[in-house]
Amino acid sequence: MIELYVDGASAGNPGKSGIGIYIKGEGRQLRISEPIEPTNNHTAEFTALLRGLEETENLTTGIVSARSDSKAVVSAVENEFVKNELHKEILHKILAITKKFDFFFIKWIPDAENRTADSLARQAIHKEKPSRIDGDL
């Protein structure tokens, strides 16, 4: 099983933005801190999940448990619905990837349980290039 933790951060509304992705499981761990185009926090959160799933599909087609501290993202994925037009496009891509896994779960977690992804997202706001640390558990 792969555990995927994601977070988005934005310094402004819109403003400089970044995403943080922490993947662990099946003997591996991966940390990604990636700057994205200036946006708002909600869009950064959706983008973080999409990028995290893109990375995860390179690792497994098995069981994936995604965790986010964004209630809006978790609710959108669970209900397969969101009102915002930009988020609809991102959600469509997210759902297409989730259907490739044998089992996919998403769960809301409090900020305190998402510190690694949060830290990576905040670091990304101040970067010009993505960073990636890939290793064994």
Image (cartoon, rainbow, N blue to C red):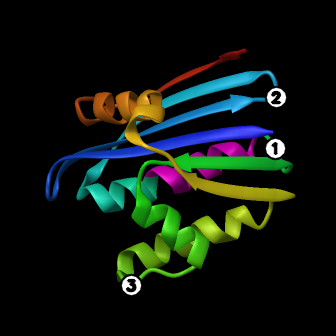
On whether residue 16 falls in the magenta region, the answer is: no
Residue corresponding to mark 3: 83
Above-or-below relation of 87 to 73: below
Disc number placed over residue 26 in the picture, else none: 2
Question: Is 80 or 60 nearer to us in this picture?
Answer: 80
- Between the C-alphas of marks 1 and 3, the distance is 31 Å
On whether residue 51 falls in the magenta region, the answer is: yes
Residue 133, image x and y in percent? 55, 20
Secondary structure of residue under mark 1: loop
- Residue shown at 25% from the left, 36% from the top: 125
Circle 1 residues within 10 Å: few <14, some 14–19, many ≥20: some
Identity, as a three-letter code, of the amino acid under mark 1:
Thr
The magenta region covers: 48-58
Q: Are marks 1 and 2 in contact (CB under 8 Å)?
A: yes
- Between the C-alphas of marks 1 and 2, the distance is 9 Å
Residue corresponding to mark 1: 60
- Residue shown at 32% from the left, 33% from the top: 124
Q: Are marks 2 and 3 in contact (CB under 8 Å)?
A: no
Dot 1 or dot 2, earlier in sequence: 2
Dot 1 or dot 3, earlier in sequence: 1
Circle 3 residues within 10 Å: few <14, some 14–19, many ≥20: few
Relative side of 51 to 57, left or right: left
- Residue shown at 81% from the left, 39% from the top: 1
Identity, as a three-letter code, of the amino acid under mark 2:
Glu
Residue 19, image x and y in percent? 39, 42
Identity, as a three-letter code, of the amino acid under mark 3:
Lys
Q: In the rendered image, which quarter is residue 96 located in?
A: bottom right
- Residue shown at 43% from the left, 43% from the top: 110
Circle 2 residues within 10 Å: few <14, some 14–19, many ≥20: few
